């Protein structure tokens, strides 16, 4: 894979970076990859790590959609856990061959469009390649891959952001699912480019709201919240009184 690093741009840049992080941090048991267009939006959720004790790779997804339907959006590679082990290094190497930009990526994109349900014929992307790898080599990889859908390891933003106020009125942090998503992922939003699937204005506005939704959970502990989810201004909701003995205890 090291030979391919210079050509692994775009979607694919995560692969050499993850490998470098794994090799450079052998003490880390798991790495959590998050795309730059994803935000943590549940600050109280506890990841069920014990559930993944026997697995090396955890995606948000559905087994039936990946293995039976071969649906190109049967899983999402924008937010996932990967164990720091030799199995994972081998998987990264098996995942990479469709990634080099140019002819290789373009031809691989045509193959993926032919083999995967619903996929348009654009150049190969890392998510489609992973679905294809798991579906075509299930006997090699599937036993160590967990497809999680009980909470939003990846939460599709367009289904969530307009409901934030409803969530705050009806639910509480810590649920992690579509009632209070762990991650809000702005898939298809490219406000700095011309190839986005959504209007830049809507994307930017909803990114601000997602930030406000997440930041409120932190700032409430200090007695403040945003005036609205889209506002940078804050308002006090209560007086925070900290006893001097508590401060001394925390310092010592």
Image: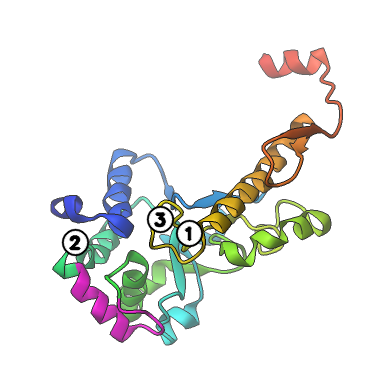
115 magenta-colored: yes
The image quarter containing residue 43 is top right
For residue 112, side relative to residue 6 (left or right): right
Query: Would you call the spot at circle 3 few (<14 residues within 10 Å), some (14-19), or many (20 or more)?
Result: many
Image height of 27 relative to 209, above or below: above
Q: Which mark is residue 100?
A: 2
Quadrant placement of the N terminus: bottom left
Label 1: which residue? 189
Q: Which mark is residue 82?
A: 3
- Regarding residue 224, the answer to whether it shows in the image is yes
Q: Position of residue 238 (x, y in %)?
A: 86, 31
Distance between the alpha carbons at the discs numbered 3 and 1: 25 Å
The image quarter containing residue 155 is bottom right
Q: Which mark is residue 27?
A: none
Residue at 40%, 83% (x, y): give it.
70
Q: Marks 3 and 2: which is nearer the front?
A: 2
């Amino acid at each position: 894979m090291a030979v391919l690093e210079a050509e692994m741009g775009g979607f694919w840049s995560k692969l050499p970076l993850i490998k470098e992080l794994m090799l450079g941090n052998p003490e880390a048991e798991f790495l959590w990859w998050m795309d730059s267009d994803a935000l943590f939006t549940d600050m109280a959720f506890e990841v069920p790590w014990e559930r993944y004790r026997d697995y090396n790779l955890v995606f948000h997804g559905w087994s039936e959609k990946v293995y039976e339907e071969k649906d190109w959006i049967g899983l999402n590679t924008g937010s996932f856990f990967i164990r720091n082990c030799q199995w994972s290094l081998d998987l990264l190497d098996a995942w990479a061959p469709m990634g080099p930009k140019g002819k290789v990526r373009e031809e691989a994109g045509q193959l993926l469009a032919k083999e995967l349900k619903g996929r348009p014929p654009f150049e190969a992307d890392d998510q489609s390649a992973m679905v294809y790898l798991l579906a075509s080599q299930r006997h090699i990889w599937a036993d160590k891959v967990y497809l999680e859908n009980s909470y939003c390891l990846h939460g599709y933003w367009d289904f969530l952001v307009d409901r934030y106020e409803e969530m705050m009125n009806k639910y509480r942090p810590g649920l992690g699912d579509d009632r209070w998503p762990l991650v809000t992922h702005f898939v298809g939003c490219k406000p700095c480019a011309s190839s986005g699937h959504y209007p830049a204005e809507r994307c930017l506005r909803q990114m601000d709201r997602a930030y406000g939704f997440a930041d409120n959970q932190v700032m409430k502990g200090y007695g403040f919240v945003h005036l609205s989810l889209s506002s940078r201004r804050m308002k006090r909701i209560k007086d925070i009184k900290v006893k001097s003995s508590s401060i001394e205890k925390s310092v010592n």
